[in-house]
Amino acid sequence: MKAFKDLSKAEMEQQLATLMGEYEQFVAKGLKLNMARGKPAPEQLSLSMSLLDAVSSQTSAEILQEGKADDLRNYGGLTGLVEARKLMADIMDVDADDTIVCGNASLNIMYDMNSQAY
């Protein structure tokens, strides 16, 4: 196969059509892929439910069913858990939609923000 830089316009268009066809086949499967590193399966998270119930007045099942779209036993995504964002937004007197709550790597976050601002 030729390198992309050596293809004619017609060959590139044919390659694009082929790749788009393959892409559409994947889309048609309706897959919900989450490539987060180390994200445990729901079955793994369920192993600790009884431990969580031992230290709370509310059962884990009740806590998890309080209208949550995300599984609170797992990672909070890119912006953090909604409840944590609301808590910090109240403390900082800002809107929760303008707040992110990350892990314990604040230096990485500060570096990223400064790099983007620069």
Image (cartoon, grey):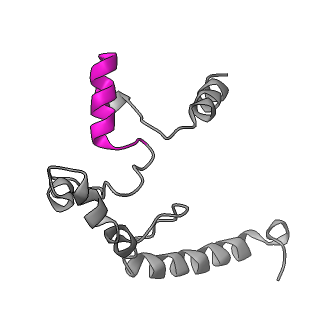
| Residue 3 included in the magenta stretch of the image | no
> Left or right of 115: which side holds 52?
left
Q: Write down the region rendered in magenta.
A: 79-96
Residue 76 rendering spot, x and y as whole percentages? 39, 49
Q: Quadrant of the C terminus?
A: top right
Q: Is residue 66 above or below residue 88?
A: below
80 relative position to 15: left or right: left
Please tell me which residue is depicted at 40% across the width and 76% down the height of the picture: 31
Of residue 18 and residue 106, the one placed in the foreground of this image is 106
Q: Residue at x 40, y 71 (%)?
A: 41
Image-quadrant location for residue 116:
top right
Q: Is there any visible trace of residue 53 in the rendered image?
A: yes
- In the displayed structure image, the side of residue 109 where residue 59 appears, left or right: left
- Magenta span main SS: helix
Quarter occupied by residue 43: bottom left
Residue 88 placement, left or right of 6: left
Q: Nearer the viewer, residue 63 or 48?
A: 48
With respect to residue 22, does 33 lie above or below?
A: above
Residue at image position (45%, 70%) is 33
Question: In the rendered view of the protein, which quadrant contains the N terminus?
Answer: bottom right
Using the rendered image of the protein, determine whether residue 94 is visible from the camera's viewpoint. no
Q: Nearer the viewer, residue 41 or 24?
A: 41
Residue 25 position within the rendered picture, expressed as x and y whole percent measured from the top left:
46, 82
- Count the labels in the image: 0
84 w.r.t. 69: above or below: above
Q: Position of residue 21 (x, y in %)?
A: 52, 80
In the picture, residue 80 is in which quadrant?
top left
Near-viewer residue (19 or 102): 102
Residue at 45% over, 46% down: 78
